[in-house]
Image (cartoon, helix red, strand yellow):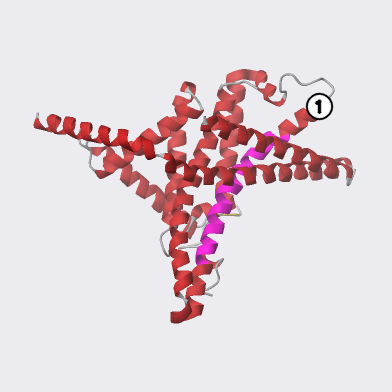
Amino acid sequence: MSDLEDIKTRLKIAKSKLASKNNIRDNKGKGNYLGNAFKLGTELVAAVIVGTIIGFILDSWFDTKPILIILFFLFGAAAGIINVFRAAKRMQKEED
Amino acid sequence: MATNPMHQFKVHRIGPEIEISGVDLSFTNASLFMLISAALLALLLLLGTREKKLIPNKAQLLSEMLYNFIAKMISDTAGKKAKPYFPFIFSLFIFILFCNMVGMLPYSFTVTSHIIVTLTFAIFIFIGVTILGFIMHGFKYLKIFVPSGVPIVLLPIISIIEIISYLSRPISLSVRLFANMMAGHTMLKVFGGFVISLGLIGGWLPLTFSVALTGLEILVAFLQAYVFAILTCIYLNDALNLHH
C-alpha cells in the first residue's frame, strides 16, 4: 500500500513540474524544424529524378529521343513542386 | 588508408563465401551490424516487458516511452484505422533507430548509410501501401491520381504529374535516410582526419567540431528514423482514408 501512496505523491510532484514547464517548452520544436528542412529538399529532387527516368525509358521504347525525356523532366519538376507544396502545407497544419 | 573518409562504408565478407544459384549470400559486416541492432532492440524490449511493475525500472520506462511515442504518432497522423499497423511501424522505427545509433559507436558500421538497405525498406513500404489501398478501396484507389475540381482539359497532364509524384515517394524516402547518414558519417571522419593531420598544436579546433558534430549526428540519427516512420504513417493514411 505504501507503494501506491508513494506513487501518488510522486505523480503530484511530476504533474506540478510539468505544468510549470509547459510555458517554456518552445525549444522542443527545434529538432522538428531540422527534420522538416531535410524533408523538403529530397522531396523536390526525387520527383525530378523519377520523371526523367520515366522519360528516358519511354524514349527508348518509342524511339523518340529526346522529346519525351524533356517533357517528362518538366513533368517531374512540376510533380516535385507539388510535393514540396503539399509537405509545406502539412507542416503548417501541424504547427496550428 | 585510415584517413580515407569513405573507407568506413566498405562492405566486406566475414567468414566463408556462400553462393546460391549465382547470388552472393555471404555474411558481411552489414549483416553482422543488422543482427547486432536487432539483438540489442530485442534485449531492451524483452528486459523492459519482463516484469511489469507499477514503478518502472529504466528498461521498462524506455520501452513504454517508445510505445507511447509511436502510438501517439500513428493516431495523430493516420487516425484510428491505422491501429492494426502499429507493430509494423513500431518495428520499422525501432530497427532504423537502432541501426543509426549503433552506427554512431566508434569502429561500427552504419547499415542505413547504404542506399540498397533504405531503398529496400522504402520499396517494401511503397508496394505494401499500394496493395493495401487497392484492397481497401478497389479501383476507386486510382482516384488519388485524379484530384477533384480539375478541368477536363488539364486532367491528362495533372494525372501524369500526380503519378510521378506518387512514384517519387520511395525514392525520396530512401534517399533522405541514406544521404543524411552517409553525409554525417563522412563529415565526422573528415574532421577526425583533420585532428590527426594538424597534430597537437592545431588539432584542437577540429576536435571541438567533431565533438559538436557527434551530438548533431545523434540528433539526426533519431530524427531520420522518426521522419521515416512518420512518412510511412502519412502514406498509410493516404491509402486508408481516401480523400483528395
Residue B62, placed above or below residue B148: below
Task: Work out which quarter of the rendered image holds the N terminus of chain B and state it.
Answer: bottom right
Q: Is residue B166 magenta?
A: yes
Residue A96, placed above or below residue A80: above
Percent x, y of residue B210? 46, 65
- In the rendered image, the residue lying farthest to the left is A2
Q: Which residues are magenta?
A: B164-189
Which residue is at 58% across, 47% downward? B176
Percent x, y of residue B182? 55, 57
Residue A92 lies in what quarter of the image?
top right
Percent x, y of residue B116? 58, 50
Q: Is residue B93 magenta?
A: no
Percent x, y of residue A2? 9, 31
Q: Residues within 10 Å of mark 1 (few under 14, many from 20)?
A: few
The answer to whether residue B36 of the structure is visible from this angle is: yes
Q: Nearer the viewer, residue A58 or A30?
A: A30
Residue where numbered disc 1 is placed:
B156
Residue B127 lies in what quarter of the image?
top right
Residue type pointed to by label 1: Pro
